[in-house]
Image (tube, coloured by chain):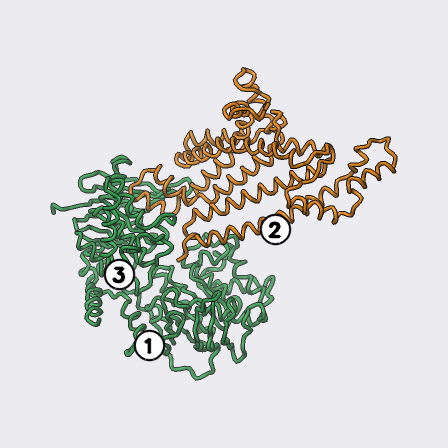
Chain colours: A green, B orange
């Protein structure tokens, strides 16, 4: 075709590891036409972002482009001078980063950051501001005339992501690289951003490379999909073909990943293990939780669902005693727990353990696994010497890591999924009856998520554990929950057994949450938006 | 802006409290000094009666809390008392000296602050280049030599050849140009001593930010390296830089005794050392309090300025 915009041939990129250079991208080809949206899919570490940046002729510090060709509209980006590449970036090729909150400069107002490149290019400041407001309006930002004059910390994450897309649009570029632009957002916010991005890319006939690990998202956005695995291309096809008839085994495994679901359990007959009763809690003067009540039963999983800021994690802090509530109480196995963890007995503390979202930051990087896992066993159960060693090995075996191989490793020598398993083993070491899982799978790739969910499920059956599973991911809820609590703005809006929650009728907010989870159908977003527009 | 005013008032109140504690420490420390002013003034031949009489006359026979109270109330009214050695009012002795010290400190700061900022920014911009290495090595050498050594090297290079005077003779009628000329060598010495610290903090604070996502974003917007450093990194690096500058300014006011001695510069530091050796406790106390105030004020200024540079603290959600 004549209107090819970007051609990448046999691209190789290496990253520095000590004195060696290790391959990150191992010979990838890519062709992009004007106005076309290419979805780039893969797990983290597959090289998606590296490839996206290479399309701008850019390699991060510690990386180098070591082979192949990059041709952007007749310009050889491998041989072009830095000055020539700079002249393209921000003008003809723009970039939208994963976390807009981190990628906007905290020291400058949004509109100043928008205007920077246009003004350097010779546009009058007032004209740049006018254009910014037009784009903010197009991106459906609230108060488009004023929002630009705020600093990044004054604007919400979803709005920042749209403001960043507007900034990328500033010079009507030919190509935009979207690097996981909605991954950090709640499902309900994600819809708005996806719709805004899709419309503006169509209106301006901009070509885009849309990088994500979420298949359902890319199905809405892309004309074609390309799949990467460890720096190599697996397959490429137009979106509908790819969704309907994936060829490669790896692609099929990606498509099948959401298959895990546990059988529906009969309603519980026993008394609840934990009862949260009429809890009102506050940070400072502001009430965060209003009259929150729910039960958790032994051997069952309660999923607490809601957007960020809905109070999910605050409930966990109340149960663990980190945040004593203003009113209400937490009853554990028939007795009321002291509100403050400092007043609880060691045995009360032992019974309730936590697993955290970021295994990276939740594990002390200086301690070996032996100490990380052994410490609660030593502290709560008084194990030492040979008995402690045997227990640590038993726990490692329980989380499916070979004890002899792993017991003396540091967290930095583990993968993300393995680190999360260590977080699980550490919680288990205290022999708790309740484990609070705070977004434990949201930082992980789908295949790794699947493994963690299966492990948690097995452990629950073997040890009769109660789980409180905090998440914003409804597909995880579908997979693992027995009961569901939906929270919004610090209140419980709906609660009940899972089958009821996923079958209509719903509370309006639950309905909104459920309908916002992207589906694989490429027409899903359009139909949803039409349906919502029809209703209002 | 209201929040800032409240913050300044709070910090001022804290500063006053700090100074109060410092005044206690100063007074307590001078109490611990061995020896007695009256006997040292009168010499070895003095009889116990005359020493006692002099002590009574100077108020030294009063209990310490009473003398502290009298001293504190005097200081609050701007009266530091009378020098025990020269019998002159201390306020008069201090006024000229303080002016000289502040003049020299400002002079050195006016050279050192812009110099170290520019060197630091350039070193960060051309990280690991030859320029970076030379600037770092030079600054570190200057800070590693003792101050008097730097001073003598400068005298050897610039005063022996007759360009600048090696001794500073100030008189009130001098024009500003003359004053700048005769104090050039001590100012240059101090510049060499304080530049390294500020330059390296500027460089480190900027480089520390160069890995952040918004710097990568700036690079992907096609901005030039200089613009990235000046407009995107520097504004976010100001807080640590301002604090280091404040500490160095405080040092310029309080820590320059050696340089004053070498250049025979009539500043506060010299007066303090003289007073200690003469056991003129009243003067020592007064100067120590001035030094403490300088530290408190400069740190207060640094805190306020760092807050002003951070929109996240200035404008709440």
Q: Nearer the viewer, residue A126 or A193?
A: A126
Q: Which mark is residue A71?
A: none
Q: Nearer the viewer, residue B77 or A497?
A: B77
From the image, tell me which residue sits under label 2.
Answer: B17
Chain ID, mark 1: A
Mark 1 to mark 3 CA distance (whole Å): 24 Å
| Residue at the spot 22% in from the left edge and 51% down from the top edge | A208
Mark 3 to mark 2 CA distance (whole Å): 59 Å
Label 3 sits on a secondary structure element that is: helix
Q: Are marks 1 and 3 on the same chain?
A: yes
| Residue at the spot 66% in from the left edge and 46% down from the top edge | B23
Chain ID, mark 3: A
Q: Quadrant of residue A75?
A: top left
Taking A232 as reference, is B162 left or right? right
Image location (x, y in percent) of residue B244: 51, 40
| Residue at the spot 43% in from the left edge and 68% down from the top edge | A288
Query: Mark 1 near mark 3, Cβ–Cβ under 8 Å?
Result: no
| Residue at the spot 28% in from the left edge and 58% down from the top edge | A143
From the image, tell me which residue sits under label 1.
Answer: A501
Q: Is residue A229 above or below residue A508?
A: above
Chain ID, mark 2: B
Label 1 sits on a secondary structure element that is: helix
Q: Nearer the viewer, mark 3 or mark 2?
A: 2
Q: Is residue B123 above or below residue A426?
A: above
Q: Is residue B261 above or below residue B280?
A: above
Is residue A98 in view? yes
From the image, tell me which residue sits under label 3.
Answer: A217
Image location (x, y in percent) of residue A500: 32, 79
Q: Quadrant of residue B237?
A: top left
């Amino acid at each position: 075709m004549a209107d090819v915009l970007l051609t990448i041939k046999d691209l190789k990129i290496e990253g520095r590891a000590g004195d060696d250079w290790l391959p990150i991208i191992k010979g990838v080809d890519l062709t992009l036409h004007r106005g076309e949206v290419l979805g780039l899919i893969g797990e983290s570490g597959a090289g998606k972002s590296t490839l996206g940046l290479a399309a701008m002729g850019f390699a991060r510090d510690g990386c180098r482009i070591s082979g192949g060709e990059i041709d952007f509209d007749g310009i050889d980006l491998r041989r072009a001078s830095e000055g020539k590449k700079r002249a393209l970036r921000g003008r003809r090729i723009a970039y939208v980063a994963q976390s807009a909150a981190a990628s906007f400069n905290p020291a400058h107002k949004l509109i100043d950051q928008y205007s920077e490149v246009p003004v350097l290019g010779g546009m009058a400041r007032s004209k740049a501001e006018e254009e910014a407001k037009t784009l903010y309006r197009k991106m459906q930002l609230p108060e488009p005339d004023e929002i630009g004059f705020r600093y990044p910390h004054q604007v919400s994450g979803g709005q920042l992501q749209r403001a960043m897309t507007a900034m990328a649009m500033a010079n009507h570029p030919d190509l935009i690289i979207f690097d996981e632009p909605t991954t950090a957002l709640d499902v309900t916010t994600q819809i708005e951003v996806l719709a805004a991005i899709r419309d503006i890319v169509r209106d301006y006939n901009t070509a885009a490379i849309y990088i994500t690990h979420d298949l359902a998202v890319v199905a809405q956005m892309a004309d074609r999909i390309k799949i990467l695995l460890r720096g190599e291309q697996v397959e490429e096809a137009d979106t509908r073909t790819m969704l309907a008839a994936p060829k490669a085994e790896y692609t099929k495994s990606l498509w099948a990943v959401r298959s895990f679901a546990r059988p529906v359990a009969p309603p519980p007959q026993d008394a609840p293990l934990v009862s949260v009763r009429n809890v009102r809690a506050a940070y400072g003067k502001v009430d965060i939780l209003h009259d929150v009540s729910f039960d958790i039963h032994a051997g069952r999983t309660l999923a607490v669902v809601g957007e960020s800021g809905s109070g999910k994690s605050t409930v966990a802090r109340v149960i663990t005693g980190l945040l004593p509530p203003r009113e209400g109480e937490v009853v554990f196995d028939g007795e009321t727990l002291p509100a403050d963890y400092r007043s609880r007995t060691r045995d009360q503390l032992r019974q309730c353990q936590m697993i955290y979202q970021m295994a990276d930051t939740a594990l002390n990087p200086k301690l070996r696994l032996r100490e990380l896992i052994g410490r609660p066993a030593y502290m709560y159960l008084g194990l030492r010497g040979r008995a402690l060693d045997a227990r640590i090995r038993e726990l490692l075996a329980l989380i499916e890591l070979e004890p002899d191989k792993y017991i003396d490793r540091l967290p930095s020598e583990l993968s993300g999924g393995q680190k999360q398993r260590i977080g699980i083993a550490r919680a288990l070491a205290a022999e708790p009856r309740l484990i609070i899982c705070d977004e434990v799978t949201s930082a992980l790739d789908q295949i790794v998520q699947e493994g963690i969910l299966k492990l948690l499920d097995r452990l629950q059956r073997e040890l009769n554990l109660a789980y409180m599973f905090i998440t914003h991911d409804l597909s995880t809820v579908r997979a693992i929950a027995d009961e569901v609590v939906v929270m919004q703005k610090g209140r419980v809006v709906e609660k009940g057994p899972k089958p009821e929650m996923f079958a209509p009728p719903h509370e309006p907010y639950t309905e909104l949450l459920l309908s916002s989870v992207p589906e694989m159908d490429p027409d899903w977003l359009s139909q949803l938006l039409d349906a919502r527009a029809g209703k209002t | 802006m209201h929040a800032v005013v409240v913050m300044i008032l709070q910090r001022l109140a804290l500063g006053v409290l700090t100074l109060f504690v410092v005044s206690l420490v100063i007074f307590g420390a001078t109490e611990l000094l061995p020896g007695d002013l009256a006997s040292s003034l009168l010499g070895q031949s003095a009889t116990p009666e005359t020493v006692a009489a002099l002590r009574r006359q100077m108020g030294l026979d009063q209990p310490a809390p009473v003398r502290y109270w009298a001293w504190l109330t005097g200081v609050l009214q701007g009266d530091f008392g009378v020098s025990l050695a020269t019998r002159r009012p201390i306020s008069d002795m201090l006024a000229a000296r303080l002016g000289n010290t502040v003049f020299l400190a400002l002079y050195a700061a006016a050279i050192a602050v812009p110099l170290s900022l520019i060197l630091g920014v350039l070193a960060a911009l051309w990280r690991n280049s030859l320029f970076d290495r030379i600037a770092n090595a030079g600054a570190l050498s200057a800070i590693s030599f003792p101050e008097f050594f730097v001073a003598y090297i400068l005298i050897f290079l610039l005063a022996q050849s007759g360009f600048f005077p090696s001794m500073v003779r100030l008189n009130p009628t001098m024009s500003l140009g003359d004053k700048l000329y005769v104090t050039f060598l001590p100012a240059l010495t101090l510049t060499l001593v304080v530049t390294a610290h500020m330059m390296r903090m500027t460089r480190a604070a900027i480089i520390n930010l160069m890995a952040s996502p918004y710097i990568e974003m700036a690079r992907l917007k096609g901005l030039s390296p200089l613009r990235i450093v000046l407009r995107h990194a520097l504004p976010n690096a100001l807080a640590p830089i301002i604090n280091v500058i404040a500490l160095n300014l405080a040092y310029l006011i309080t820590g320059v005794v050696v340089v004053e001695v070498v250049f025979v510069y009539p500043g506060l530091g010299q007066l303090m050392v003289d007073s200690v050796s003469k056991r003129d406790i009243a003067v020592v106390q007064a100067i120590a309090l001035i030094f403490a105030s300088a530290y408190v004020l400069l740190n207060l200024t640094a805190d306020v300025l760092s807050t002003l540079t951070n929109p996240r603290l200035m404008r709440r959600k």
